[in-house]
Amino acid sequence: MTYCFEFVNLAVRYLETGDEGCLRGLAELDAARHIFDHASYCKYDSSISTPLELVTLLLSNRDKLRKSVPGILRNIDFVKEHVMKNDSSQRIALECLPKGFAHTGKLFFTVAYMDGVAFGKNCSLNLAYPIYVEHPDELAFWAVHEIHHAGFLELQKGKLPIFDMKTFGDMAKFIACMLQLEGMGTYAALALRESRNSLDKYGDYENLKNPQRMKELESLFFEFYEPYSGDPSRLLSDDDWQEFFRASEYRMQYTVGAKMAQAIDQRMGREALTGLILQAPEVFIATYQNL
């Protein structure tokens, strides 16, 4: 995996100068295409139809974002020292990917689009995201998370379930995919957080070290998931969507997925865990249930 600062560097120039030519330049970058493709997939804003429109929207509040420039510059330095140096974050992510795998994508450093995303074989981190500006060390952990995502998706050849779900079966596939993807990304960074005494600095990891809470979340996950997997042809209703959004607030895909990954790793070994990436996500769930 290679590292690309073109977007964040040009965005900082725009924030400092207001030169609108920078917006056109940003829109032509691979990083802009990456976040545009992700935004299109997840229906970020239906009015956006080009990378230039997305970049213009993201940087429209220039006065507010300009206050983040000192933090962005600090984060660039942090990334070079704690993410890029010795490929530290990538090496950790690779430990939770199949042996012999090598990334062919890029990690883009951006401004203003979500905290971090992966799409296809690429991923990105938003160096202006408030948590990263306040706590730069989070970048090392979330770089592991997003780099793992990029490897996961590259191995899956970029396959993601349709976001515009119509049936219970569509929803079940989406839930299972997000559980494995986010759970394994969360688990990949767990040891690094433990080594730096940072489990209590992010809610997902606080939950992971609380057995009673994890038991509750696991029960809640299966209570939520099983009706969808058990009746795949049924059409989704407005009430089902409301339940989906309500359940998403618990972040079970991160915590329960990480618990499953950890259990499989401890009981069956790392090769068994990473080999599941090459199979349907329902197999990941079934493997955990059969431990």
Image: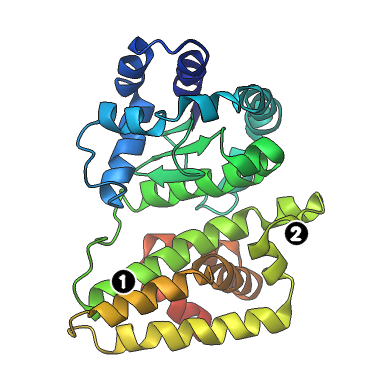
**Rendered location of residue 66, percent (x, y):** 55, 23
Quarter of the figure that contains the C terminus:
bottom right
Q: Which secondary structure lies at badge 2? A: helix
Horizontal relation, residue 47 to residue 287: left or right: left
| Residue at the spot 43% in from the left edge and 60% down from the top edge | 277
The reply to whether callout 2 and callout 1 are in contact (CB within 8 Å) is no
Q: Nearer the viewer, residue 106 or 266?
A: 106
Horizontal relation, residue 129 to residue 166: left or right: right
Amino acid type, mark 1: Lys
Q: Which residue is disc 1 drawn over?
A: 173
Q: Which secondary structure lies at badge 1? A: helix
Q: Which of the two labelled residues, at mark 2 and mark 1, occupies the earlier sequence position?
A: 1
Q: Nearer the viewer, residue 159 or 135?
A: 135
Amino acid type, mark 2: Leu
| Corner quadrant of residue 256 | bottom right
Q: How crowded is mark 2: few (under 14 residues within 10 Å), some or many (20 or more)?
A: some
Horizontal relation, residue 194 to residue 63: left or right: right
Q: In this view, does 100 lie above or below 166?
A: above
| Residue at the spot 53% in from the left edge and 60% down from the top edge | 184
Q: Name the mark on residue 158.
A: none
**Rendered location of residue 206, percent (x, y):** 72, 66
Q: Which residue is disc 2 drawn over?
A: 199
